[in-house]
Image: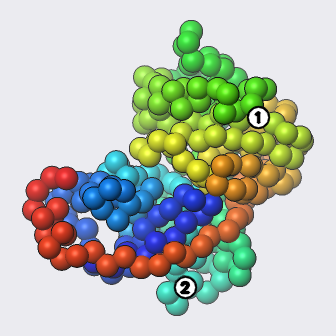
Amino acid sequence: MRLERYHGLGNDYLVLADGALPPVGAADLVVAICDRHTGAGSDGILQPAPAGPCDFGVTIWNPDGSIAEKSGNGLRIYARWLVDSGQAGPAFSVWTGSERVGCEVGPDAIAIEMGSARFAPADVPVIAEAPLIEGPLDDELGPYTAVGLGNPHAVRFCVEPLDTLPWRAWGAKVEVHPRVPNRTNTQVARVIDRHTVEARIWERGAGETLASGSSACAVAAAAVKTGRCDHGWVRVVMPGGDLRVEVRPDGTLRLEGPVERVGAVIVDESWLARRSAQPA
């Protein structure tokens, strides 16, 4: 098994470039590979998949063995790998299993069309009678804005310096809150100006994350929805670095930022055989 390691602002993924996950026990093997002490270590695995109505297809695995509906950084990394491996030109589409994503790969940045930000409860999904816009999840947790991007997000805006807040504890609680039945990515954000927002990210299935493309999109979309930022380009500042999100008046989003290749990982056959034979 050959894996290609890339990162987008410290959010790292392994692309399954050669070999295959087993038809039974794939989730356990993903957990084992992503383990940073006894495996290759990663925030997730990108597995080539049927292209459906697009040029290429991908399955996005979280490090806990669950499958993500979408990942902005994961898709940007997969796009970069497709070009690096000679499979794609500078513009193409990728099928996530449920959604078409347009990709453009330049020398310094990868841009992807992230679709529309959705706030209707069924589109997040979140259990609510009306869109959850700066509303409390319960008496303890809130206020949050719930955003659907093909995967669920919950954004909380604060005025305090973010690292003085218990945002990790908030994220862990919100991720598994009963009102978000599919679990959710959680962001705590602070607006710098009308086109700049700072964010901290708790990613569903991964925990604290240095940067996230879909989270950056959720933060930018929520900032515009709540009147904190203007339509157009919003810079989202995260510990790993900055991403730019274009929030258009029709609600569609374009994500842009860098991706860097780290190198290749060749998985030892005996290690793979042991992990494939029994649960991780």
Left or right, residue 18 beside residue 5: left
Left or right, residue 115 beside residue 236: left
- Residue 80 lies, with reference to residue 27, above or below; the image says below
Instruction: Tell me the amino acid under the disc marked 1.
Output: Arg
Residue at 59% x, 41% y: name it.
201
What element does badge 1 sit on?
Answer: strand
Left or right, residue 120 beside residue 250: left
Instruction: Tell me the amino acid under the disc marked 2.
Output: Asp
* Residue located beneath label 1 in the image: 190
The crowding category of the residue bearing disc 1, from other C-alpha atoms within 10 Å (few below 14, some 14 to 19, many at least 20), is many
Residue at 66% x, 33% y: name it.
163
Q: Estimate the x, y position of residue 272 in percent, counting from the top left.
A: 19, 69
Q: Nearer the viewer, residue 205 or 117?
A: 205
- Residue 35 lies, with reference to residue 204, above or below; the image says below
* Residue located beneath label 2 in the image: 84
Question: Which residue appears farthest toward the left when viewing the image?
Answer: 277
Which circle's residue, 2 or 1, is located before the other in the chain?
Answer: 2
Label 2 to label 1: alpha-carbon separation:
36 Å
